Amino acid sequence: MEKIDNIKQLYKMVFHKTKFIQLVADDLGKSAKYLRGNYFSQFWNIPEQHQDRVITLLQRTIKTQI
């Protein structure tokens, strides 16, 4: 499984997607609007250097919401 596919599957499990996108935006120093339109849209255009960090944040978010 590619990292993008993993991100897509994990993202489906996030309850509060807006809060998660803001968390990633703060962590990566990007705007939430930019991330929503590029990282977490139909394009899933997440740069390779950020994919591991996004996966880590997804895993932590899912773990804390359970």
Image (cartoon, helix red, strand yellow):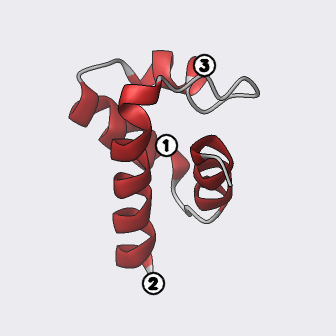
Dot 1 or dot 3: first in sequence order is 1
The residue that label 1 is drawn on is: 18
Gap between marks 2 and 3, in whole Å? 27 Å
The correct choice, above or below, for 34 with respect to 9 in the image is: above
Q: Is mark 2 on a helix, strand or loop?
A: loop
State the separation of the CA atoms marked 1 and 3.
12 Å
Kind of element beneath mark 3: helix
Residue 66 x/y as whole percent: 45, 84
Q: Pointer 1 and pointer 3: residues touching (CB < 8 Å)?
A: no
**Coordinates of residue 8 in the picture (x, y in percent):** 66, 49
Q: Single out the residue that lies furthest toward the bottom.
A: 66
- Residue type at mark 2 is Ile
Q: Residue 51: x, y in percent?
A: 44, 38
Task: Classify 10 Å Cα crowding around label 2: few (below 14), some (14-19), many (20 and above).
Answer: few
Q: Which residue is drawn at 41% across and 65% down?
A: 59
Which residue in the structure is indicated by mark 2? 66
Residue at 55% x, 27% y is 39
- Mark 3 belongs to which amino acid? Gly
Amino acid type indicated by mark 1: Thr
Bin the neighbour count of mark 1 within 10 Å (Cα to Cα): few under 14, some 14-19, many 20 and up.
few
Q: Which of marks 2 and 3 is nearer the N terminus?
A: 3
In the figure, is residue 7 to the left or right of 20?
right
Camera-side mark, 2 or 1 = 2
Quadrant for residue 56, please give it. bottom left
Q: Which residue lies furthest to the right in this view?
A: 42
Which is more foreground, mark 1 or mark 3? 3
Classify mark 1: helix, strand or loop.
Answer: helix
**Label tally:** 3
Q: Which of marks 2 and 1 is nearer the N terminus?
A: 1
Residue position marked by numbered label 3 in the rendering? 37
